[in-house]
Amino acid sequence: MSTKKNTAYNVAYRMFSVLLPLVTAPYLSRTVGTEGVGLYSLAWSVSYIFCLIGMLGLNDYGVRAIAKARDDREELDRTFSAIWQMQLLVAGVTLLFWFGYVFLVAGKEKPIAFHLTLMSVSCLCSFDWCLMGLDQFKPIALRNTFVKCAAAACVFLFVKSKDDLWVYAFVWSLSTLLGNLSCLTALQGKVRYVRVPFRESLKHLGPCAVLFISVMAVNIYRTMDKVMVSAIAGPAENGLYENAEKIIYCLSGFISAVGTVMMPKVSHMVRNGETERIRRHIARSMNLVICMVSAMAFGVAAVADRFAPLFYGEDFAYSGTLMAPLAFTLIMIGFANVIRTQAVLPQGRDHVFVKSVCCGAAVNLIANACLIPGLKSMGAVIGTLLAEMTVPVVQYLILRKEAETDYPKYLKYVGIYAVIGGAMLLCVRGVGRLLPENTWVHLGIMTAAGIVVYGILTLIYWKISGEAGFLRRRVK
């Protein structure tokens, strides 16, 4: 399947994944309140960490390994089988530890955590890494979309009060498992399981473990901040932070959609030694991603204070205050994601990824420990900003002299789109002054004004700089 079709399927699925939680979030917020949202956030965060352990970095390593082996069917079958055997071992042991956490460690969130168990079970049969490595994004998108729609319908039907939080947890946990099982049929005819010695599976354990360090480091500052806010400032404060961070996390799905498609493609180019083609791919992707994330970041910052109380209810008005600065992490995430998925992981430079995200995690933990006691959820926002800024800076320090990377050009994109985004923000805030009443209609007018201004200024820049022709050309 072509890169354009893969990107279309993946972006469409990511858009759906973005919109679906935003459909259920207002209902959940009004049904269970700030403390209920905070308790669910804590249980889900811990469950997600166990799932990351169960997958052990396979979402990066597995994609790369399959992409490099896909031209040789025998090698492909052996690679798939060896990795899956390793996955079964790690995910099975992790599932046992998850039960230990639920029954021996969990506190008030214990009933919710128990009903999230199927998320850990799903790690035994998650084959997204294989499908993505084979450039098969359509089955993932279509099957998971259907399952998630059914899950959302169940939320509205069965979650009626705070006492139904366990239902909410079980529905989404079950949907994760069913989504993984539904994708299993898509592997038929493309790859098959063959018996391989277990020592061959263990060969993949080391490289996976290296990537797992970086995956865990990333999620320390994307998940542990919620645990720390809940522990230090309380579940209600964590509920405010959760709903602010949820919008940013959803939008970051658009960023990962591009990177997810490009990583197997660039991994294949690396195997064929196409250095110049890789360089052009990175430049083209960076231009598009920075354009996209700058629009998101400045747009969210411009309307966050109006959006949060309208969307989540007045009890969550402070989520808008948290959301505005948090939005600018999107620019840093976008920049780092392009470098990670196209210049680092496909070429086996795992140490660069590990160093950058470990530094980010260290910065985040120190900042959270210092700031959350005094600033509560805003301290977590500042810690996340510092962490996300650290990752691309460390990547730059390591890769600035590499042939595949052109950092002066990338930084030029950041500066130009930041200026365009700043102009859009001022325009949106100006329109807001003319529309003081906070309604969905007025918010829509402000959003439309921002889209028009950003679109026009971007087209002018593309026309003057010649970037429009560059973006239209296919990389050969």
Image (spheres, rainbow, N blue to C red):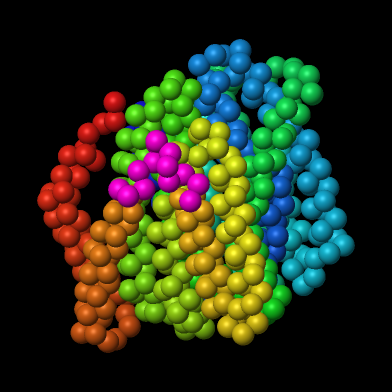
Image-based side of 249 in relation to 466, left or right? right
From the viewer's side, name the closer residue of 219 and 135.
Answer: 219
Residue at (64, 24) in percent of width and height:
80
Image-based side of 212 in relation to 278, left or right? right
Q: Tell me if I can see residue 31 in this picture.
A: no
Q: Position of residue 254 (x, y in %)?
A: 41, 51
From the viewer's side, name the closer residue of 171 and 6.
Answer: 6
Image-based side of 388 in relation to 327, left or right? right
Q: Position of residue 374 (x, y in %)?
A: 62, 85
From the viewer's side, name the closer residue of 131 and 79.
Answer: 79
From the viewer's side, name the closer residue of 111 and 322.
Answer: 322
Depicted 380 relative to depicted 295: above or below = below
Outermost residue toward the bottom in this view: 436
On the rendered image, what quadrant is the C terminus found in? top left
Q: Position of residue 400 (x, y in %)?
A: 43, 46
The residues colored magenta run 397-409
Residue at (47, 36) in percent of width and height:
263
Residue at (29, 53) in percent of width and height:
413
Outermost residue toward the front in this view: 401
Quarter assignment of residue 6: top left
Residue at (79, 53) in percent of width and height:
98
Outermost residue toward the right in this view: 104
On the rendered image, what quadrant is the N terminus found in? top left
Residue 401 is one of the magenta-drawn residues: yes
Depicted 373 relative to depicted 338: above or below = below
Q: Tell me if I can see residue 43 in this picture.
A: yes
How many marks the image carries: the answer is 0
Q: Position of residue 219 (x, y in %)?
A: 61, 56
Residue 109 is one of the magenta-drawn residues: no
